[in-house]
Amino acid sequence: MIAGITIAMILVPQSMAYASLAGLPVVYGLYASFLPVIVASLWGASRFLHTGPVAMLSLMSAAAIEPLASRGSEEFIQFSVLLALLVGILRLALGVFRMGVLINLASHPVIVGFTNAAALIIGLSLLSSFLGVPMPRSDSFLTDLSFVIRQIPITHGPTLLFGLGTLVALYWLRKQFPNFPGVLIVVIVGILISAGFGLEKIETISPQQIADTEVRAQFNKLMADEARLKQLKNEQKLIYDKLARLEEDDRQSYRLQANLLQLLGEESSLKHSLYRDRIDAHAIALSPESTDEGEASYSIAAETGPFVTVWRWEGYSGDKIRLSGGGAVVGTIPSGLPGFSIPMIDIGIITDLFAVAFIMAMIGFMEATSISRALAAKTREKLKPNQELIGQGLANIVGSFFQSYTVSGSFSRSAVAARVGAQTGFYAVISAFAVLLVILFLTEYLYHLPKAVLAAIVMSAVFGLIDYKSMVHSWKVRRTDGIVSVLTFVTTLIMAPKLANGVLVGVAFTVFLFLAGTMKPRSEVLGRNAKGSLVGAISHDVAPISENFVVMRFDGSLVFINAAHFEQAVLKSLSEFPNARAILIIGHSINRVDASGVEKLRALNRDLQAAGITLVLAGLKKQVVQALERADLQQDLGEENIIPSTATAIKILEERFPEPHVRQVI
């Protein structure tokens, strides 16, 4: 009970903050914190894992939907809910078919590089909320961030104070009172201060109230472009609907597709101009002046500054211009339970979202698994990753029918639950019902919550995930791992907001390095050190065992990808010993052999026999010996040349090919 109530105090403000990060009204964060939490608790494996909105998937959801619909629009909300359904189905399928092992494709360096980059992107994407300036949403996060940085001179002072004050307060509360619900405290204090001092100042005016004709023309053009963008979206939807009803070879479909391409091109061009126009419009500082008609006239302000009250463009309400003279607040939050509704099913949109949904399903599972593993290490709880996939999948599926966007396991909330003494997953159910009470009775009290406070809450959570020491550690352990980690980090930053691409590049490079290592396993001629142990002759600067036979170790399985390299390594070793009449392959590291490996051994043995050289194998594992038996290779090699013990094999060869002199390796 105590854990559930404690988590609810964190969950309510966090869920609203993450919904804003996902480009959704804050109430959808509350919806995602009710039924999905209960379903995941009932069907998941970990009794500590708390499911709900999380920062990383919220940002990925926004990035995936952004090219398809405008933020805040009804379509944007519908696509976000559809994405949750897709992620849920994919996770459920992975769990049912026990495919949780796919997560192993993302190595630790990839996870570290991606997590660091994602945390940095999430935090910096909220910088605009800190400064009280708009942030464009384009295909390049770094470009968008540069626009925000350019607007630092027009920072809204009170908004910045709210953000910085929240960060300082959260840090201090976490250090001095770790068991206090610090997030809830800063939210309550923020609401009281915002309401008391009137942080929000909104005026809706007609274009005629703008005194400067150039400014009025600029605002009117921006209004017309915004209206045209909505019209383009509607025209595209009509074409998509028509195409869905036509046959692929219908002549009319080609004309519709051509029209669609034209509309998409116009939309892309219009969006890019709108990004700059919105920022330029917001940069204009206006001040009101009384007129004889009693209606205020707004002209360019003579004085500006962080703490000087000026009015700036905020948006439009119908044919009216909305100006803001203060900071942004959450505003009106609808109360009441989320209604049941079937997610919008659109094959074209599903096709566009499927790849991102799969990456989000895997990243969410990776996040949830790492949390469960960390908590299980302390509590000795048995990990069941496939069952966790099922629980997370069902949570997203059920949630999507009740207006929830994508959810996953939260590290911060799960860790707090374990610390305050949660014993079973029922604590999460209690936290969900606490959210329900907020939805039903308390939403009106959240109106004055500053968005800067929500941004600070997210920043405080995600900046704690930044861990550059792990990247440095990966570099120290193995240079290639460090390269993978840095490459994933840089790629994720460059390709943001499409975070999934960073993971794909990291995984692809990891697989490439793995294949490169598998293609050319290490091999070395062996000698004996002073203690009589077998070691690499060159690497340990010792003499090889004999001039009349070569002892070589091959450190890898003998399969199709490295069979040719194995042959080259054998021939290279023999080329250094012109008097050698046999070569002994030490096979302790050969875990398996496939058909290509068997045939390579057969062909190599035939060529060596023709040259008067005997091929001997020693120390092979049982499964490798059985594979050779099934391929009848023992008959070609001779059973006397497949010897279980390495020591025995060397002794036999020394008896067959006595050599009193040993050549020193230089």
Image (cartoon, grey):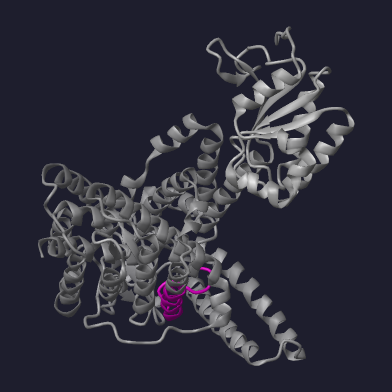
Q: Residue at x 40, y 62 (%)?
A: 57
Q: Position of residue 591 (x, y in %)?
A: 59, 43
Foreground of the two, 430 or 92: 92
Q: Is residue 86 left or right of residue 123?
A: right
Q: Which residues are magenta?
A: 66-86
Total of numbered circles in the picture?
0
Q: Quadrant of the N terminus?
A: bottom left
306 vs 98, nearest the viewer: 98
Q: Main secondary structure of the magenta part?
A: helix
As displayed, is residue 664 above or below residue 425?
A: above
Residue at 58 percent across and 79 percent down: it is 348
Quadrant of image for the C terminus: top right
Q: Position of residue 563 (x, y in %)?
A: 74, 42
Q: Is residue 259 magenta?
A: no
Residue 487 in the figure: left or right of residue 638: left
Residue 460 in view, yes or no: no
Residue 654 locus on image (x, y percent): 70, 18
Please give the name of the residue rendered at 43% of the width and 76% of the height, measured from the top-left corner: 85
- On screen, residue 450 above or below 570: below
Residue 569 lies in quadrant: top right
Residue 270: x and y, percent?
58, 69
Q: Quadrant of residue 232?
A: bottom right
